[in-house]
Structures are given as structure tokens and as C-alpha cells.
Image (cartoon, grey):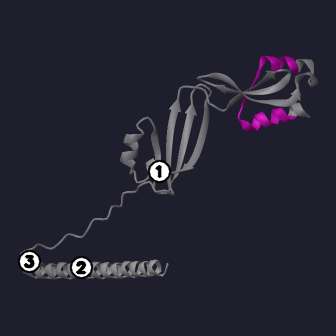
Amino acid sequence: MHLYKNRIYVLVILIVVGLVAYFYIANNKTERNNMSASKYSLENDNKHKINTPPKAAPVSSSEEKITPNTEIIYKYYYELDDKSVEEKEQAPYYMINLDKEELVEKYSDWEIKNFSSKQVVMEKTLKEKSPLYYRIGEKDGYIAVYYEKPVNGISLKEITDTPISALPKDEQERIKKGIEVYGEDELIRMLEDYSS
């Protein structure tokens, strides 16, 4: 057991000595390379001072680009119902570092209304109905809410706790036919009216 401990101590000491030697050699190599590079640079600078034309000042790119903090505003105009919808988000990763020309090229079906590193406004006109329509209807004897989608038709969003039988007959008929509602606010208002 004592011999085993001695071997471990020797192994640990060898590893430590090896690491110290490695870092010492690597550090000296880096210093020598830096010195020879700076010496070479100084020698070459002195040789070419007479023959080289003056260097032009570096041109800084004043062209604005999209950054991670840029606010992107998407404006959709729906021709069939004359509605506009606006969505905002921070620049997605795939837009970061794009300039205006690159954005116009990548999003050729959009109109770029404003472009700066703070905000980009993009507009698109669609020949369809806005996606913010809902239909209040009936499902299994209860008031139900459906999404009204231009492509897929209607699909169930939720079934409320309000039985249709609790409403007057004329409202029951309207709901059975389906009541078209635009926007979340109007939907909430109508559902509150039916539940009270």
C-alpha cells in the first residue's frame, strides 16, 4: 500500500513538472515570435519609407445594418376585408447584419418603408382576408368559438361553459347560423355579453 502511494505522488509530481515546462516553453516561443515579427516590421518599414505612397485613411462603413436590437415591424394589408395588421419583434438571427440592399433582395415580395439600425418597417399587401376573424357558433349545446381561416376554413378554438339554451331564441338562431367577429377584443366583449 505504501509503494502504491509513492507511485501516485511521483506521477502527480511528474504531471505538474510537465505542465510547468510546457507552459514555459510555449510562452517563450510566443515571445520570440512576437519579437522577430516586430523586428521584421521595423526593418521593412524603414526600407520602404521613401518608395511607398502615403496610405489612404481607412473608410468606415456608414451603411446601416440590422442589429440584434433592431425592432422589425411587419405591416400586412388584407385587400379582401380592407384590414391592416401590424406585428413587432426584435430582429431574428437570420436578419442580423443585413443592410438595406440585402434585405430588399432577400424579401423581394415586401416593400421596405423604413430602414435604420433602430427600426425596420416592412409592408406587404395580400389578396386575402385578415386572419383575425372568429366565428361564434354552437357545439354540443354550448357556445363555441371557431377560427375562421382563409385557406383551411373554420376550426374549433374553444367551447365555452355557456349553454346555448340559456339565451333568448333569436340569439340561439344567430349563434347556430354563426356570428362573424373581428379581433380578440370584439370576441371577448361578445362572449362576456353571452355569459352574463
**Which residue bears the numbered disc 1?**
93
Q: Position of residue 99 (x, y in %)?
A: 38, 51
Check disc 3: other Cα within 10 Å, few if <14, some if 14-19, many if 20+. few
Q: Nearer the viewer, residue 128 or 48?
A: 48
Q: Amino acid at mark 1?
A: Tyr
| Circle on res. 48 | 3
Q: Position of residue 195 (x, y in %)?
A: 89, 33
- Which range of residues does the magenta coloring cover? 171-192
Q: Amino acid at mark 3?
A: His
Task: Report if the CB atoms under discs 1 and 2 are less than 8 Å apart.
Answer: no
CA–CA distance between discs 2 and 3?
29 Å
46 vs 14, left or right, is left
Residue at 26% in and 82% down: 28
Indicate the secondary structure of the residue bearing disc 2: helix
Indicate the secondary structure of the residue bearing disc 3: helix
Q: Which is nearer the N-term, disc 1 or disc 2?
A: 2
CA–CA distance between discs 3 and 1?
45 Å
**Which residue bears the numbered disc 2?**
29
Check disc 1: other Cα within 10 Å, few if <14, some if 14-19, many if 20+. few
Residue at 46% in and 56% down: 67
Q: Nearer the viewer, residue 170 or 24?
A: 24
Q: Is residue 99 above or below residue 179?
A: below
Image-quadrant location for residue 176: top right
Q: Is residue 113 magenta?
A: no
Q: Amino acid at mark 2?
A: Lys
Q: Position of residue 62 (x, y in %)?
A: 36, 61
Image-quadrant location for residue 130: top right
